[in-house]
Image (cartoon, grey):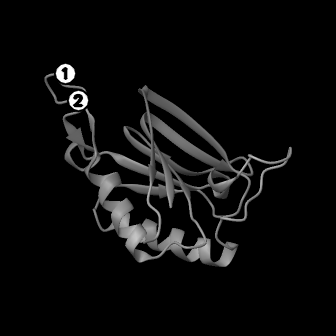
Amino acid sequence: MRVIVQRVKSSQVTVNGEIVGKIGRGLNLLVGIADTDTDNELDWMVRKCLELRLFPDEAGGDRWQKSVQEIGGGLLVVSQFTLYGDCRKGRRPSFDRSATPSLAEELYNRFVLKLRSSNLQVETGKFGAMMQVMIENDGPVTLILEREAE
């Protein structure tokens, strides 16, 4: 499982001209599911996304003092199978490591449900749709999280 985590001032996702998900301060999560992912990877990733200290404290001191949970921020979760695109050979990416659409959608939906148990605002895009994602990156702070099946 791969997640691109972006600390944002705001973020929204649009499908066919309609805003389907929108948050203010928080994290934009671009989520790629591998063909080997299980609930173990989901659970690890949920904990990481919720507990990573990526936000400054109220006094404006240390830039990495608070988690999204501690600031009561939002989460915008967008499925992105292209995170498993392998561009090492040829001119066209291979997506052999990406989960099948049915498995990816099932695991993506479970990931979103687990995040929602945090009681934070959790918004999503539309799985499998062409989406336009607007991200007002704060910092910018962008991290890559990866967890492979054991």
Write down the quadrant of residue 24 in the picture. Answer: top left
Residue shown at the point (59%, 47%) measured from the top left: 13
Residue shown at the point (30%, 53%) measured from the top left: 50
Residue shown at the point (53%, 68%) measured from the top left: 108
Q: Secondary structure at mark 2?
A: loop
Residue shown at the point (50%, 61%) measured from the top left: 1
Left or right side of 15 for 146:
left
Camera-nearest residue between 71 and 90: 90
Residue that label 1 marks: 60
Disc marking residue 4: none
Q: Residue furthest left?
A: 59
Camera-nearest residue between 35 and 21: 35
Residue that label 2 marks: 56
- Give the percent coordinates (x, y) of residue 93: 78, 51
Crowd band around label 2 with a 10 angstrom C-alpha radius: few (<14), some (14–19), many (20+):
some
- Give the percent coordinates (x, y) of residue 57: 17, 30
* Disc 2 to disc 1, C-alpha distance: 6 Å
Camera-nearest residue between 121 and 111: 111
Q: Are marks 2 and 1 in contact (CB under 8 Å)?
A: yes
Q: Secondary structure at mark 1?
A: loop
Q: Amino acid at mark 1?
A: Gly
In what quadrant of the picture does the C terminus appear? bottom left
Left or right side of 111 for 33:
right
Left or right side of 49 for 33:
right
Q: Amino acid at mark 2?
A: Pro
Instruction: Tell me: residue 76, above or below residue 60.
Output: below
Left or right side of 53 for 128:
right
- Give the percent coordinates (x, y) of residue 77: 50, 55
- Give the percent coordinates (x, y) of residue 54: 29, 37
